[in-house]
Amino acid sequence: MNIITNNKEKSELGIAVLKEVLDPEIGLNIVDLGLVYELNFDENSNITLIMTLTTQYCPMGESICNSAKNKLENAFNGYTVNVELTFDPQWTLNLLSEEGKKFLGR
Amino acid sequence: MLNGQSNVAQIANTPANAVVPFFIFGGISFITASVISFFSANKLLSHYLNPEIISLTHIMALGWVTMIIFGTIHQLLPVFIESQIYSIKLAYIVFGISIIAIPMLVFSFYRFDMGKYSIIAAMLMITAFVIFLINIAISILNSKTENIHAIYIFTSAIWLMVTGISGLLQVVNFSTILLENNSFYYLPFHAISGICGWFLLLVIGISSRLIPMFLISKYTNTKLLWAIYILINLGIVTFIIIFLHNYQNYLYYIPIILIFISIIFFIFYCYNAFKLRIRKTVESQLKVSLFSVSSIIIPLILILIIIGLTGFDKMQIKIFSIFGFFVFFVTLSVLILGMTFKTLPFIIWNKIYGKISGKFPTPSPKDLYSNFLFNIMIITNGIAVLLFIIGIIFSEVLVAKSGAAIMFVSALLYNLNLFKIIFHKPSFHEHNNK
């Protein structure tokens, strides 16, 4: 699990919060699922989360992104969260963390 | 740093309102079908060419299976083609036309009225099929990605139109002589294009994407899917050629064997997806769907027996009845019973909790329906199917009637769970938090 960040300290809390965001179908959090690519913070209290989905136009995609945004806004009071979706690189099963694989029974 | 190209709103999927009505109509049709089968159980045991069985077949094929498929495709096509559906309005129009045409057609068939009402209904149904085809064709053309699953869906929609047109010609032929033979003669043509062209291609096209997706499987094999696609289409076209040229009966083994091989290939595909899955635990909804997909082989074995029984009319008719029953009440029905609860709860959950998710505690999509009712529904369905088949084999009306009564219970449980999902309200605590 290699999440790029420009602020290690804040990203620790951010990643912990994002571990509470579940993919409703799989039941696994988006960090261990490997959906989170980048989490950046700037001096104007903006957070940019760059993430992907298991499939583009995933029926649950919008709610997963909203959930991540809402969780980060709750954890970082006064910050504006911007969620950007990217499909480059595309999500593959290789992005699953060891915890994620264990959760799924492997 | 990666460059996030899109924002979240751009991946918005088909709205629930464009999908849910198809499920409601499908659920009601399933109940209606179980009622018709109860009152027509004695007819099920005689020759299949009677008004009750024709109307039962059409409420199952159009009202139950096709309507749920229409709803599901409007929801899932964007996932397959990675692009939005071309027009939501067209989805509403397809629904609007279908809810007029299907009851009209079924009622006309039940009364064996092949006059203007059944002709109008058939024409309306074809209009709905054409609009559906246009909508998915433009959606696929607008998408940037090319994929085999979309090609399966598109081809199956063409076969659906062929089925509709052949059906209309048969209905018109009752009052105005259009065809060389009587309308019933063309039933095999109508049946093969509907069952193999529409249902089989579609089930394989959708399942080959959904099964690995739900199992979180590494397995993909596009070449194998192309081979299956070619075998099925070749099988249907060969069948039609043999039929239209009135060739020897034994030649029908060629198309049936082609389709048989394609099913074996597909079962092999599902087995590999299952073997290479990351998700160890398989939910009961998916187990039910896997069973249903594997059961496709049984109707094909029955067809092989039917061809072999030429000359033994009584036995042939009986096995033909089991074949029809198995296709609609087992393979397709069971697939819907399983897949409904893998799709609809997520659609409704998204609608209710999609925006507030992450702000407050929310239930999981699986909490929107009762797993207990689901299990009872599957058990009653299994008992009903067994009783029905025993009833048909031994010509026992009472046994078949009991099967129909239990099927009614199963349909009722399906609808109870369906409406539990559709009318789900956020709990008081969540309202307060809003």
Image (spheres, helix red, strand yellow):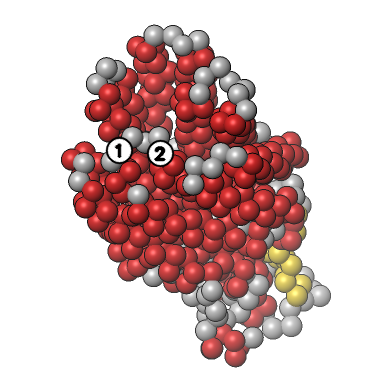
Left-right relation of B199 to B148: left
Task: Determine if marks 1 and 2 fall on one subunit.
Answer: yes
- Residue B226 x %, y %: 52, 25
**Dot 2: what SS?**
loop
Looking at the image, the residue that sits furthest to the right is A44
* Residue B185 sits above or below residue B51 on the image: above
Mark 1 → mark 2, Cα distance in angstroms:
9 Å
* Residue B326 sits above or below residue A42 on the image: above
Q: Which is nearer the eye, B45 or B297?
A: B45
**To which chain does the residue with label 2 belong?**
B
Q: Is the C terminus of chain B in the top left, top right, bottom left or bottom right quadrant? A: bottom right
> Which residue is at 76% across, 72% downward?
A46
Q: In the figure, residue B43 lies in which quadrant?
A: top left
**In the rendered image, which residue does mark 2 sit on?**
B50
**Residue contact at pointers 1 and 2, CB within 8 angstroms:** yes
Q: Which amino acid does label 2 sit on?
A: Asn
> Which residue is at 33% across, 55% downward?
B38
Residue B46 bears which disc, if any? 1
Left-right relation of B24 to B48: right
Q: What residue type is labelled 1?
A: Ser
Q: Which is nearer the eye, A98 or B290?
A: B290
- Residue B384 x %, y %: 27, 53
* Residue B137 sits above or below residue B308 on the image: below
| Residue B341 in view here | yes
